[in-house]
Amino acid sequence: MRFKLTVILGNYNKACFLPKTLDALLAQTRPADELILVDDASTDDSVAILSSYVSRHPNCRLVVNDTNQGANRNVNRLSAEAQGDVLFFAPSDDLVYPHFFEHGMELLEAHPQAALFSARSDMIDAEGRNLGVFHIPLVSPVPTYIDPATCVRLLMRDDSWFMGNVTLFRRDRLDRKSTRLNSSHGYISYAVFCLK
C-alpha cells in the first residue's frame, strides 16, 4: 500500500530561511503528495517567497492568515484539511535530508501498524553549517518497528526520543479526540499526540 504524504509548513517571519527549507522539501527523492504552506501574518517577505514556490509547484497551496493564529491553531486546522495518510509538520527554518520522506514512508508502509516514523536530527546554525547530531536517546542502532508496549517502556526510561521536526505521523493512528492542541502547551506540543 502506498500512503499519501502531506507536508504542512507553518511560517511566521522566517523569510530568510524559507528558500533553503522549501528547496529541501521539494528535492526529496520521494516527493510529498501535498504541500500546504501557511503564513501566519508575517511582516517580512515571507508571503512573496511562499507565493513564488506555489506558482511553480502544482501540489502546493498557500494559506495566508490576516492575523497571527499561532502554531497550534494552524496545525489543528490544516491537519483536518490535509488529504494525506501521513502528516509531516515542517518547521520553516529546518532542512530535511533528501531521502527523509523516502525512508520514512518505506518504513511506515512496511509496518502499517506503526503510528509514526522518527529519525535523528542534526543541528545547524543560521548559515546552514552542520553542528552535529542533536543528542537524544538512541533506542535502536538500525531502523526498526517498536511495538506500543516497548514504546511506552522506552519513553518511561529515556523520556522522549522522537522529535517533531523529524517525525512523520500516521493520520489514522492519531486519536482525533486528543490531538487538538492547546496554545498554552507551546509549539513543540504537537510531538506528544496521543496515539492509538
Image (cartoon, grey):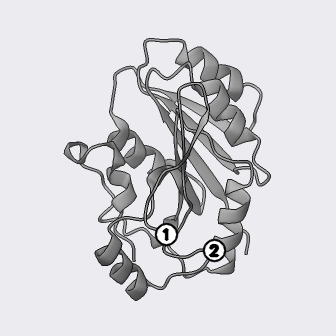
Please say whether residue 3 is visible from this viewpoint: no
Residue 98: percent from left, percent from top: 74, 48
Looking at this view, is 16 or 10 the one in front? Answer: 16
Q: Quadrant of residue 168?
A: bottom right
Is 145 placed above or below 63 here? below
Report crowding for label 1: few under 14, some 14 to 19, many 20 or more residues within 10 A (C-alpha). few
Residue identified by numbered label 1: 138
| Circle 2: element type | loop
Residue 154: percent from left, percent from top: 38, 78
Question: What's under tag 2, amino acid-wise?
Answer: Pro
Looking at this view, is 128 or 39 the one in front? Answer: 128
Locate residue 32 relative to residue 41 in the image: left or right.
right
Is 18 placed above or below 191 here? above
Residue identified by numbered label 2: 143
| Circle 1: element type | loop
Is 100 placed above or below 14 here? below
Q: Residue at x 37, y 38 (%)?
A: 71
| Labelled disc at residue 108 | none
Residue 34: percent from left, percent from top: 66, 47
Q: Residue at x 67, y 60 (%)?
A: 4
Return the residue found at the far right: 29
Q: Are marks 2 and 1 in contact (CB under 8 Å)?
A: no
Report crowding for label 2: few under 14, some 14 to 19, many 20 or more residues within 10 A (C-alpha). few
Q: Residue at x 51, y 82 (%)?
A: 146
Looking at this view, is 76 or 121 the one in front? Answer: 121
Question: What's under tag 1, amino acid-wise?
Answer: Leu
Residue 15: percent from left, percent from top: 54, 19
Q: How many marks?
A: 2
